[in-house]
Image (cartoon, rainbow, N blue to C red):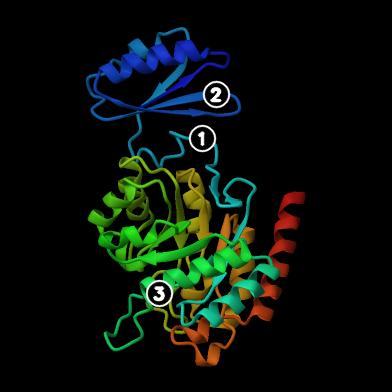
């Protein structure tokens, strides 16, 4: 349930109403927009008299929300959420370029890539320290040593770092990580999501390769129900019958999610297509569709990468992508 308050409602009036609602055993979330304040009620609202609340002078309207996701719902939070990450932001008018290698291989490799992607316009550095792989014989990542290398790159470039977590027991190692990524395979690892909900870290939540948008939002809800509202959603392609690309990039997810939720949305064209040559057109299309950012794999020597070389761009190619995407963003802003 949400209560939309009239313009000009005082802080004292909001405080009094909030106190009364909490006394009814409800969780209360307040979202102050440019013209209205929205009070979201989470819990058993069946005993709440909606007509009584709507009769209050300060209340403009009361609406019940049928969707199972509440905190992530745009009806609860009409304005776009803007998340601050280190010295940059994502959401609203703030577009993010998250770039770096699929996996951390060495300090020299990460340092070279970090400096190159920053020069090309990256706002965050991605890199896998823990790597979930289909085969147990493939490179699994440098783990704690990989995080240390990323932190050194952060110190050298100032770029906030994004890296994937595999297990809630690993959380102490992520204390200095700016954005914790939950990969597609862990999107419905509900125990992990609950633990992340108890942190104040920004979480980049990837859509599972066979999950619906509703399921993605419900996974975000797990994190938000724990008190952590710093979530970035990521569309990284879904599995379909098509075999020419690694996955099928669902760009319709961008406007659909923007309608449903206030959370920022990024697109990962690298994992979605599996081909470096398709990253640029898909990145441009994602920007045109209204995405809040891109996550792109960049490697200084893709041919010899230990993981996902065929979909990785060279730094020079990444610079071409950021240039092309920025032109798309400029064209959109003129409309």
Relative placement, left or right, of 295 versus 166 is: right
Q: Is residue 5 above or below residue 55?
A: below
The CA distance from mark 1 to mark 2 is 9 Å
> Local crowd at mark 1 within 10 Å, few (<14), some, or many (≥20)?
some
Q: Position of residue 14 (x, y in %)?
A: 45, 15
The CA distance from mark 2 to mark 3 is 48 Å
* Proximity of marks 1 and 2: CB atoms separated by less than 8 Å: yes
Of the residues under marks 2 and 3, which one precedes in the sequence? 2
Of the residues under marks 3 and 1, which one precedes in the sequence? 1
Residue at image x 30%, y 81%?
134
Q: Is residue 19 above or below residue 73?
A: above
Q: Position of residue 159 (x, y in %)?
A: 59, 62
Residue of label 1: 78
The CA distance from mark 3 to mark 1 is 42 Å
Residue of label 3: 145
Query: Which mark lies nearer to you, 3 or 1?
Result: 3
Q: Is residue 163 above or below residue 230?
A: below
**Which quadrant would the N terminus be assigned to in this image?**
top left
Residue of label 2: 36
Residue at image x 29%, y 89%?
137
Q: Secondary structure at mark 3?
A: helix
Relative placement, left or right, of 36 versus 53 is: right
* Res 63 → quadrant: top left
* Res 176 → quadrant: bottom left
Q: Position of residue 174 (x, y in %)?
A: 38, 60
Of the residues under marks 1 and 2, which one precedes in the sequence? 2
Residue at image x 40%, y 74%?
145
Q: Position of residue 191 (x, y in %)?
A: 23, 54
Q: Secondary structure at mark 2?
A: loop
């Amino acid at each position: 349930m949400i209560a939309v308050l009239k313009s000009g409602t005082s802080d004292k009036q909001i405080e009094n109403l909030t106190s009364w609602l909490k006394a009814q055993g409800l969780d209360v979330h307040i979202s102050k927009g440019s013209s209205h304040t929205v009070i979201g009620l989470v819990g058993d609202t069946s005993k709440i008299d909606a007509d009584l609340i709507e009769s209050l002078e300060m209340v403009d309207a009361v609406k019940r929300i049928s969707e199972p996701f509440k905190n992530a719902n745009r009806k609860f939070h009409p304005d776009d959420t803007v998340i601050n990450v280190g010295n940059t932001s994502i959401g609203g008018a703030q577009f993010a370029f998250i770039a770096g290698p699929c996996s951390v291989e060495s300090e020299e490799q990460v340092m070279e890539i970090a400096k190159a992607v920053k020069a090309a316009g990256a706002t965050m550095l991605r890199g896998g320290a823990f790597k979930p792989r289909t085969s147990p014989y493939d490179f699994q990542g440098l783990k704690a040593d990989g995080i240390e290398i990323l932190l050194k790159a952060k110190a050298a470039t100032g770029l906030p770092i994004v890296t994937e977590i595999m297990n809630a027991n690993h959380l102490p190692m992520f204390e200095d990580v700016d954005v914790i990524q939950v990969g597609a395979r862990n999107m419905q690892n509900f125990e992990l999501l609950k633990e992340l909900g108890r942190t104040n870290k920004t979480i980049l939540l990837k859509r599972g390769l066979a999950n619906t948008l509703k399921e993605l939002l419900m996974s975000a809800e797990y994190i938000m129900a724990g008190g952590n509202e710093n979530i970035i959603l990521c569309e990284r392609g879904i599995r379909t019958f098509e075999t020419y690309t690694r996955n099928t990039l669902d760009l319709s997810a961008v406007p659909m999610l923007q309608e449903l939720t206030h959370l920022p949305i990024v697109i990962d064209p690298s994992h979605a297509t599996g081909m470096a040559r398709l990253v640029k057109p898909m990145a441009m299309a994602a920007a045109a569709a209204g995405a809040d950012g891109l996550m792109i794999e960049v490697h200084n020597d893709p041919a010899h990468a230990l993981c996902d070389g065929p979909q990785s761009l060279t730094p020079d190619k990444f610079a071409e992508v950021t240039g092309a995407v920025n032109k798309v963003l400029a064209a959109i802003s003129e409309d």
